[in-house]
Amino acid sequence: MKGKVGFMGLGIMGTAMASNVLKAGYPLLVYNRTPARTAPLVRLGAEAAASPRALAQAADVIIAMVTGPEALNDLLFGPEGAAQALGPDQVFIQMSSVSPSYTRELARKLEATGAAFIDAPVSGSKKPAEEGTLVILAGGEPEQVAAATPLLSTMGKKVVYCGPAGQGAMMKMMINLLLGLMMEGFAEALNFGKAGGLDFDAMLEVVSSGPLNCGLYQMKAEPLRRGDFPPAFPLKHMTKDLKFLVDTAYETGASMPVGHLLLHLYRLGVSQDLGDLDVAAISRVLETIGQKWGAEKD
């Protein structure tokens, strides 16, 4: 699978991922709803498409990496949507974070075009996207995923086959539930220790010296120390994914009691204008709750 690649969606993740596709030698055509975002990739040798439809007409493989269902529906089914130009000799790879039920419905909608459909969201944030070390969570027909693996491997260090279309999204939801739990738990534990007078560096030393040590905590320790949260994975995106998780748990009958509480906490963060900050800004939500509790006690 070495034809021309069309990439739609050039946000925090998409720009880095598309850049790695280009660096690997694939001819690249790009589209973004904010046209100015195509400029850096055009300078590197990509072409800019005038519309999603024009992109799909010119590309062999079409990749979408956008914020959610609304953006995907616009790119695919809007007045100049890509779906109009998809055909049997093409592959559509959906890499956005969306729900499993939406993904399966999207696969059914695109089936009439004859294009192969691959469901391939990613595990990882800005830095792994830049380094090409994402984990690709692939769903679809096994032979189609196998054929796309060299292309997917330009963006990630590992491609994990998860099952039919929709199961890539299911795996993404699973791993983001764990991320949400771990991030909130880390922030809560540090906030608890800080309130009790513990030294921040001493707390980190204890965490990093035992079995609880992990890459996520190492990555988020410095932003938590500084209280400064440039977005690697924006808090609003975690909130969106937690809503997908709660809905999926209802559909599947899975028990997710803490997940419901997490959605509430992250939604509080969005309501406090923290949505565009990194997910680690959940610590500010906890601090605010603590301050209000302290004020009520006084």
Image: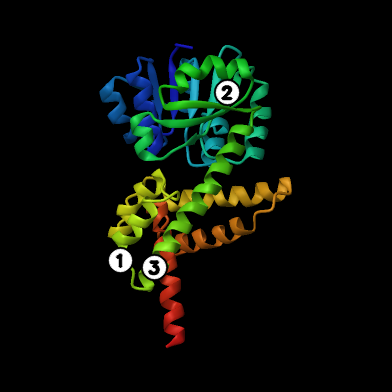
Disc 2 is placed on an element classified as helix
Q: Which residue matches tag 2? A: 84
Residue 46 in the image, given as x and y percentages of width and height: 33, 21
Residue 218 in the image, given as x and y percentages of width and height: 35, 48
Residue 57 in the image, given as x and y percentages of width and height: 49, 17
Name the amino acid, label 1.
Asp
Name the amino acid, label 3.
Gly
Mark toward the viewer: 2 or 3: 3
Mark 2 surroundings within 10 Å by alpha-carbon count, few (fewer than 14), some (14 through 19), many (20 or more): some
Q: Which mark is residue 243?
A: none
Residue 80 located left or right of residue 164:
left
- Determine whether 215 is above or below 236 in the image: above
- Determine whether 147 is above or below 226 in the image: above
Residue 216 located left or right of residue 142:
left
Q: Which residue matches tag 1? A: 199
Q: Nearer the viewer, residue 58 or 128?
A: 128
